[in-house]
């Protein structure tokens, strides 16, 4: 397909890398010039072009700009009726995207993660499931949601990723002070967590690790007693409240 990207931040750049080698023509904007130039140098099918050229040459356009800056960036551009637009902008509804890109079709709001660069990533989205699966589904799993309210709830819940990474980093730092190769210790912990959660739901994994007196049970009970579950719920509630 002929794909265009307006904005080349960390997430948009990861999406471009995840699409490399699949036969697409990919045009990216020069916003974040260092990243766009790097993408062009790394990936043969990537071209850095002007914003209007991206629109003129693309079937599907991805918006990777900040929601508060979108209107100023997009106002003077001319979208086509036959174009589909996919937004990465958190906080911008499909209705708002539709207004910004008329007469093009606002096909979906999609929230990718950095892991999409390698594939095997979860993608949460609201909108055109068939289109997103066509572009991303061979290498990733698209979780299409039913309503804007569901998307907002998912956006809150996905924020657990950063605390999980923080816990993993802290455990790796603790381990690194006690072993010869700290980097190997962190790699072990990352693979341990991701591989086990990939093949088991959380409750089943907790039960499998619930050996009486075992290390996993003892640490979990200690952290639960310290209130980690209640703190997490309060944090998610605050995100939901805005």
Image: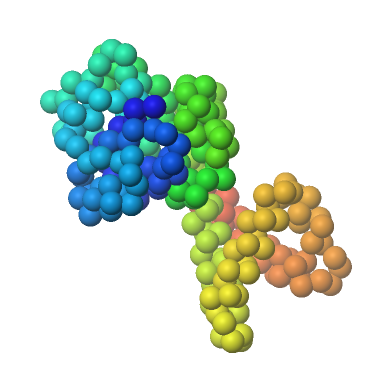
- Compare residues 8 and 201 and report the one nearer the observer: 8
- Compare residues 179 and 53 and report the one nearer the observer: 53
Q: How is the image coloured?
A: rainbow
Q: Is residue 139 left or right of residue 195?
A: left
The number of callouts visible is 0
Q: Residue furthest right?
A: 212
Indicate the position of residue 31 as horizontal and vertical percent values. Answer: 20, 44
Q: Residue furthest left?
A: 76
Indicate the position of residue 35 as horizontal and vertical percent values. Answer: 27, 52
- Compare residues 27 and 231 and report the one nearer the observer: 27
- Compare residues 28 and 180 and report the one nearer the observer: 28
- Residue at (67%, 63%) from the top-left corner? 192
- Residue at (67%, 49%) from the top-left corner? 198
Q: Is residue 221 above or below residue 235?
A: below
Indicate the position of residue 78 as horizontal and vertical percent values. Answer: 18, 21
Q: Is residue 218 above or below residue 60?
A: below
Q: Classify the position of the N terminus by image quarter.
A: top left
The answer to whether residue 136 shows anywhere in this view is yes
Q: Is residue 7 left or right of residue 201?
A: left
Location of residue 45 by image quarter: top left
The answer to whether residue 62 shows anywhere in this view is no
- Residue at (58%, 75%) from the top-left corner? 184
Indicate the position of residue 38 as horizontal and vertical percent values. Answer: 28, 53
Q: Is residue 75 left or right of residue 129?
A: left
- Residue at (62%, 67%) from the top-left corner? 189
Location of residue 6 by image quarter: top left
Location of residue 207 by image quarter: bottom right
Q: Classify the position of the C terminus by image quarter.
A: top left
């Amino acid at each position: 397909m002929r794909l265009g990207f307006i904005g080349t931040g960390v997430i948009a750049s990861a999406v471009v890398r995840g699409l490399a080698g699949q036969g697409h023509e990919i045009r990216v904007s020069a916003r974040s010039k260092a990243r766009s130039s790097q993408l062009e140098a790394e990936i043969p099918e990537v071209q850095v072009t002007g914003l209007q050229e991206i629109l003129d040459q693309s079937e599907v356009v991805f918006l990777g700009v900040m929601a508060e800056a979108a209107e100023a960036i997009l106002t003077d551009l001319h979208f086509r009726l036959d174009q589909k637009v996919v937004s990465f902008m958190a906080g911008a509804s499909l209705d708002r995207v539709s207004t910004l890109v008329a007469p093009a079709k606002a096909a979906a709001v999609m929230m990718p993660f950095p892991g999409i660069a390698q594939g095997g990533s979860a993608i949460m989205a609201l909108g055109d499931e068939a289109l997103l699966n066509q572009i991303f589904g061979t290498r990733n799993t698209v979780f299409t949601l039913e309503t804007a309210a569901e998307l907002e709830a998912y956006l809150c819940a996905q924020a657990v990723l950063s605390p999980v990474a923080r816990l993993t980093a802290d455990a790796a730092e603790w381990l690194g002070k006690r072993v010869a190769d700290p980097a190997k210790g962190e790699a072990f912990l990352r693979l341990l967590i991701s591989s086990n959660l990939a093949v088991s739901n959380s409750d089943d994994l907790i039960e499998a690790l619930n050996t009486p007196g075992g290390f996993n049970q003892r640490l979990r009970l200690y952290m639960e007693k310290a209130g980690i579950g209640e703190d997490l719920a309060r944090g998610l509630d605050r995100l939901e409240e805005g």
